[in-house]
Amino acid sequence: MLVKKINAIPKINNIRLSLERFVGNPILGPDTKHQWETKAAFNPAALYEGGKVHILYRAIGETDVSVLGYASSRDGLHINERLDKPVYVPRESFEGANPHRPYSSQPSGIYVSGGGGSGGCEDPRLTKIEDRVYMTYVAYDGHSHSRVALTSIHINDFLKHKWNWKKPVLITPPYIVDKNACILPERINGKYVIFHRVFPNILIDFVDDLDFDGKSRWLVGQYKIPTRILSSDWDNLKVGCGPPPMKTKYGWLLIYQAVGTNDESRYKIGAMLLDLKDPTKVLARTKTPILEPLATYENEGCKYGVVYPCGAVIIEDHLFVYYGGADTVVCVATAKLEQFLEHLATDHKEPKPQSIPVHPETQSFEMPDSVVGFCDKCRRVRVIRNPHHLILDMRHAIQGICPVCGSKITVIVKPKSGIDEDMAPRQMKTKKEGKQKK
């Protein structure tokens, strides 16, 4: 059944790489029977597991709060199941949760995106790593800066619709609008890779674990995939990740959304190939959009001229991209995978793939054997206990506790030259240096 339906999609044999819209779009829309999704059902995350596509979509109803609904499809095109209650709702103050009124929040502010002026949980992305499904999403409290939040659920609970989500935490700093976050499904050199967006670029961070505390440890944006620079480029104003990148033999396939200065009111979709061993390097990038808002359902709704991808899956030899249309409905577009990838890798190759650090001075660091710092409470120099590395004001730092009084000690590190002399009385000796001296 799947092969018959998809083989009817026209072949891509022109110079311009593109996706083909499903003739049955939109596949999901607002539902007036459920108060929580009467106005919009859009921006869908997608996960292919257990023989079907699981879709978590952003929904807005009578309270103007964004919640997440669930639907699934066995063939990737037609909806076979749709739950009548939201599967994820605001629980924390940073999501606009209000215990006195379900799914309500503060008055709408200047950071409203795609409706939902009363805050909530927006634009989810799903990544399965081992036995957990991780979800990143935009947390908006209704009045302050939008930030990225992270939660997870065991895969068995997810498949059984037991929505035992882990307590969410913020992973981006305050006072910065950060969106479009997703997690690579594999670790690179033992580190998790998180993509996100601070205007106008895609940012990339490598982290040791996903155990954020929501208080002091944030994504910093170590590397970037920038907008293009020519005035004629279609993606020269802002770019952001769509779904989590998908592994192929050509590289990590990243579907992204972008806006250009020549068409500032319309969101379009493009594609990139990232290096399998170093996903900060862009091997190929579409010179033109692979999908533009041309259909009626992409131009009539809460916001006209929007195709906004949040989910994508590979089923057999086909690519399915799930996107929001006009901030109102859920749609899907497809392509023959091998043909799509070969075209992208061959005709849209980047001339000089390179890794671009956001702040070069923060990219190289090696933890020393021991670190000393000045304890303000003891008024003495101490060897720091339990030291760990972090970035402060885009500089390397080591933080730990005083072994005598337990106070926190922070030491700023100078690039390439050890401890900042203004912050500590003597330099550090790295493990590598110690071995060389032996």
Image: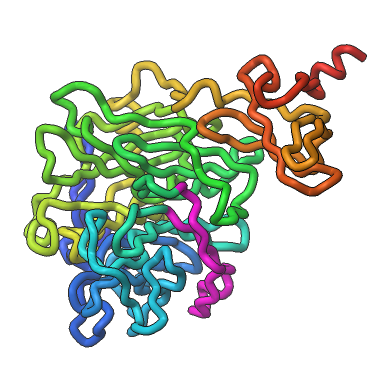
Considering the image in quadrants, where does the C terminus appear? Answer: top right
> Looking at the image, which residue sits at the far top?
437
Q: Which residue is depicted at the point 37% across and 65% down?
A: 121
Residue sitting nearer the eye, 148 or 130:
148
**Is 162 included in the stretch rendered in magenta?**
yes
Residue sitting nearer the eye, 240 or 321:
240
Q: Which residue is depicted at the point 33% across and 24% down?
A: 349
Q: In this rendering, is residue 306 above or below 261?
A: below
- Residue 54 in the image, given as x and y percentages of width and height: 41, 68
Classify residue 60 as left or right of residue 246. left
Which region shows up in magenta?
Answer: 148-173
Residue sitting nearer the eye, 96 or 338:
96
Is residue 129 in sight in this rendering?
A: yes
Q: Which residue is depicted at the point 82% across and 29% down?
A: 369
Q: In this rendering, is residue 247 above or below 122?
A: above
In terms of image quadrants, where is residue 76? Answer: bottom left
- Residue 398 in the image, given as x and y percentages of width and height: 68, 34
- Residue 416 in the image, given as x and y percentages of width and height: 64, 15
Q: In this rendering, is residue 255 above or below 273?
A: below
Classify residue 347 as left or right of residue 192. left
> Looking at the image, which residue sits at the far right?
438
Instruction: Count how many numbered circles sit on residues in the image.
Output: 0
Considering the image in quadrants, where does the N terminus appear? Answer: bottom left
